[in-house]
Image (tube, rainbow, N blue to C red):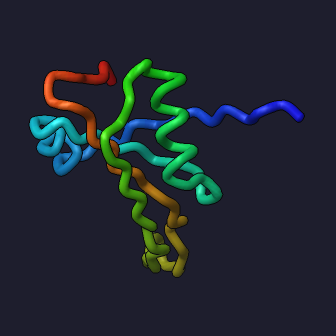
Amino acid sequence: MEKKILKLKPRISEKASFLKTGNCYVFEIPIDMNKRMVAEAIKNEYKKTPVQVRVVPIPKKQLFMRGKWGTKIGGKKAYVFLKQGDNIEV
């Protein structure tokens, strides 16, 4: 059985750019991905070993636009902490 390697998409936001100063990087990940899979993807893609990985769900949100109610799709994001001195080029 072939291993499925998933791509991590960096999450660009004001909070994420603030966290970069403390060696923490934020990525949007698929819903079925867990901490170990995120750590393995970081090792494969960026050749860095994370010290800690935290996974947080992004809740769905209701919004009203152009006279209609809709839903913003939720998802998951991962906070990846690296050793002091390691950086990832995003």
At 17% from the left and 47% from the top, the residue drawn is 14
The part of the image, by quadrant, that contains residue 63 is: bottom left
Q: Is residue 34 left or right of residue 87?
A: right
Where the C terminus falls, by quadrant?
top left
Q: Nearer the viewer, residue 57 or 80?
A: 80
Answer left or right for 90 relative to 42. left
Rendered location of residue 39, percent (x, y)? 47, 39
Q: Is residue 83 left or right of residue 57?
A: left
Rendering quarter of residue 26: top left
Residue found 57% across the figure and 33% down from its top: 7
Position above or below: 84 against 74 = above
Q: Residue furthest right?
A: 1
What is the count of numbered marks?
Answer: 0
Percent x, y of residue 22:
12, 40
Relative to 24, does residue 58 appear above or below in the rendering?
Answer: below
Quarter of the rendering occupied by the N terminus: top right
Q: Report the front residue among 45 and 18.
A: 45
Q: Which residue appears at 26% of the width and 34% of the height? A: 82
Q: Residue at x 18, y 50 (%)?
A: 15
